[in-house]
Amino acid sequence: MSRALFICFEAEESALVVGCANALGIPFDTLVLTGSGGCGENSLIAGLESVPPADGLAEALVSHVSGYTKIGLVSSMRSKDLAGRLAALLDAAMLTDVISVESADTFHLPMVAGSIVTTATVGGDKLVFTFRPSNFPKDVSASAGQTEQISLAPSARTQRTKAAARSGGRPDLSQAKIVVTGGRPLKDAATFESVLGGLADKLGAAVGATRAAVDSGIAANELQVGQTGKIVAPDLYIAAGVSGSTQHMAGIKDSKIIVAINTDADAPIFESADFGLVQDLFTALPEIQAAAKGT
Ligand SMILES: Cc1cc2nc3c(=O)[nH]c(=O)nc-3n(C[C@H](O)[C@H](O)[C@H](O)COP(=O)(O)OP(=O)(O)OC[C@H]3O[C@@H](n4cnc5c(N)ncnc54)[C@H](O)[C@@H]3O)c2cc1C
C-alpha cells in the first residue's frame, strides 16, 4: 500500500508538509529529527539534540523509512544532501524542488532557472523527493494522531568541526515573510550591513544578496538568493541595487510583492517588480527605514 513519510529536521517544519501530503492523497506520517511534534497519522520522534551530518543520518534512517513508498522533505541544501543519500541507499527515484503534485506518481518541478516547468512521472515503487513549501498551503494547527519515540544512532564517520552562526538572529531567508536584498552597488561588507541590515532589522526581515555581491565579498555566501543560492517566497521582497538577472529572478519569482530600487529605469528587474523606484538606494533605503513603523 502507498504510504508517505515526511522527514522534518525540526518540529516546526511539520506545518509545512501538510499541504504537500494532502496533495499526494495517500496516508502519511512524519519523522521529526529534533524537537517533538509532527503531524499525519503517526509521528516518529527521533529526539536528536542536533541534526547530524547527512551520510551517517541517511544510513541510520534506512530501516525506519524503507516501508514507505514516498519520502518527502522540505527543499533546502541539507534536505537535498540527505535525500540523495537516502535515494541511493533505498534504490529509489529522486526529484528535487517539486512545486505541485498532479497525482501520487506525477509531479511538476522547475528547470532551467525556473524558466520551464517540467512534468515528471516516476516509475518504480519508491520515490524520495524535496518540495518547495511556499507552493503548498501551510497548516500550523496540524498535529499527529499518535506519536512514537524511535531510536536513531547515526554513525560518526563524518564529524562537524565548526558551525558558523547566522548573523544577528535574523529570520531564515527561505522562511522569512520580508526579505531585503542588496546587490553589487552596496560596495563593501560594512556598507551592506549598515544600509541594508538597518532596514531589515526595523522590518523584522531577512537579508539577502546577489551573487555579484557575494563574489565581491560584500555579503556572506549563505545570503545568496537565486538559481545557485536560496529560493525565497516572502510576502514582500525589496531588491536594492539588483539588476534582475535571470539567475537571480529564478530564486524570487514566488515572492508575493517585489519592490525594486534601481538608478537605471531600464534595469530588467523592473519588468518583474510590482513596485519600482528609480532612485539611488543610498537615498531611498534610509528614507524607507526612517518612515517604516517597525515590528
Ligand atoms: C551559472 C550562474 C549562476 C548564477 N546564479 C546566481 C544566483 O543564484 N543569484 C544571483 O543573484 N546571481 C547569480 N548569477 C549571477 C547573475 O548572472 C548576475 O551577474 C548577478 O545577479 C548580478 O548581480 P547584481 O544585480 O548585484 O549586479 P549588477 O549586474 O552589477 O547590477 C547592479 C544593479 O544596481 C544598479 N545600481 C547601481 N548603483 C545603484 C545605486 N546607487 N542605487 C540603486 N541602484 C544602483 C545598476 O543599475 C544595476 O542594475 C549566476 C550566474 C551564472 C552564470
Image (spheres, grey):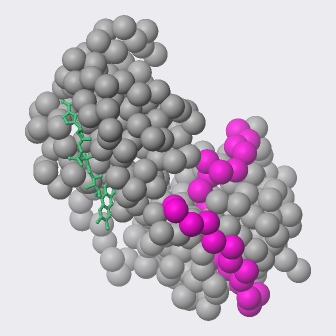
Horizontal side of 23 relative to 200 (left or right) equals right
Query: Which residue is drawn at the image coordinates 12% and 33% (left, top)?
Result: 190
Rendered position, 26 above or below 187: below
Corner quadrant of residue 277:
top left
Horizontal side of 119 relative to 130 (left or right) equals right
Inspect the magenta stretch and tell me whether residue 183 lies in it.
no
Horizontal side of 279 relative to 139 (left or right) equals left
Residue 160: image location, x then y, percent: 30, 66
Check the image and name the residue furthest to the right: 1
Between residue 79 and residue 38, name the one nearer to us.
79
Query: Which residue is drawn at the image coordinates 11% and 39% (left, top)?
Result: 188
Residue 101: image location, x then y, percent: 75, 64
Inspect the magenta stretch and tell me whether residue 128 lies in it.
yes
Residue 216: image location, x then y, percent: 13, 51
Between residue 152 and residue 217, name the one nearer to us.
217
Query: Which residue is drawn at the image coordinates 37% and 44% (left, top)?
Result: 268
Rendered position, 185 above or below 39: above
Rendered position, 200 above or below 227: above
In magenta, the rendered stretch is 114-140
Query: Which residue is drawn at the image coordinates 73% and 42% (left, top)?
Result: 139
Query: Which quadrant, please, contains the N terminus?
Result: bottom right
Corner quadrant of residue 51:
bottom left
In this orientation, does residue 6 appear? yes
